[in-house]
Amino acid sequence: MSTPHADAVTFSDLSRNPRAVAERAARLGRVRVTHRDAPDFYLTAADREEERERTLSTVSRLLLALIKHDPTARALVIAMPEVFPWVRHLSSTELRAFTLELVEAFSDAAELDVDTTTQEVVASWRATARIKADPAHYAEARKPTSGDFGPVEVSG
């Protein structure tokens, strides 16, 4: 294998010696396959991936149950600054909204196999915190606007 990382192989390695790469993936749990002209991917055993899915589902259901029994999500809201230090720039209402939206995104990842939503939720709330952290930007963002700002691009 011609790569400096113990958990990575090149796409050429995989195509030249698939059995050795598969054995390595089985031994290590997963192997990153690097590709010069495309995004990297992981080769992993199906049972390991299924276990990860069950784990995500369990965590998601646990968090949803916590919120169901405590609609204020107090325990989760208290823990959020340890995971996301930038939430200090959000109001308490925004922090609760972020917490609920994040738990719902975890549920979507676990139950619907929609993984991108979680990172979108974090990125959106982080952007909100970033603007609120800078008083000048925040004041500018709160100013009323008028006029037509042109067409809106919608990505699909």
Image: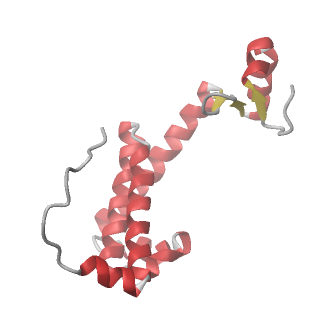
> Where does the image place residue 156, in percent across and percent down from the top left?
30, 38
- Marks counted in the figure total 0
Viewer-nearest residue: 83 or 76? 83
Q: Which residue is drawn at 82% across and 18% down?
A: 20
- Left or right of 1 in this view: 123: left
Color style of the picture: secondary structure
- Left or right of 3 in this view: 154: left
Tell me if residue 91 can be seen.
no
Q: Which residue is drawn at 79% across and 29% down?
A: 27
Q: Quadrant of residue 16?
A: top right
Viewer-nearest residue: 73 or 10? 10
Residue extending farthest to the left is: 147
From this view, report whether residue 128 is shown above or below residue 142. above
Q: Which residue is drawn at 39% across and 87% down?
A: 135
Viewer-nearest residue: 134 or 129? 134
From this view, report whether residue 76 is shown above or below residue 36. below
Quarter of the image where the N terminus is located: top right
> Where does the image place residue 69, in percent across and percent down from the top left?
31, 67
> Where does the image place residue 129, in percent across and percent down from the top left?
41, 74
Q: Quadrant of residue 41?
A: top right
> Where does the image place residue 49, in percent across and percent down from the top left?
58, 33
Tell me if residue 136 can be seen.
yes
- Left or right of 33 in this view: 116: left
Q: Residue at x 29, y 63 (%)?
A: 68
- Left or right of 129 in this view: 144: left
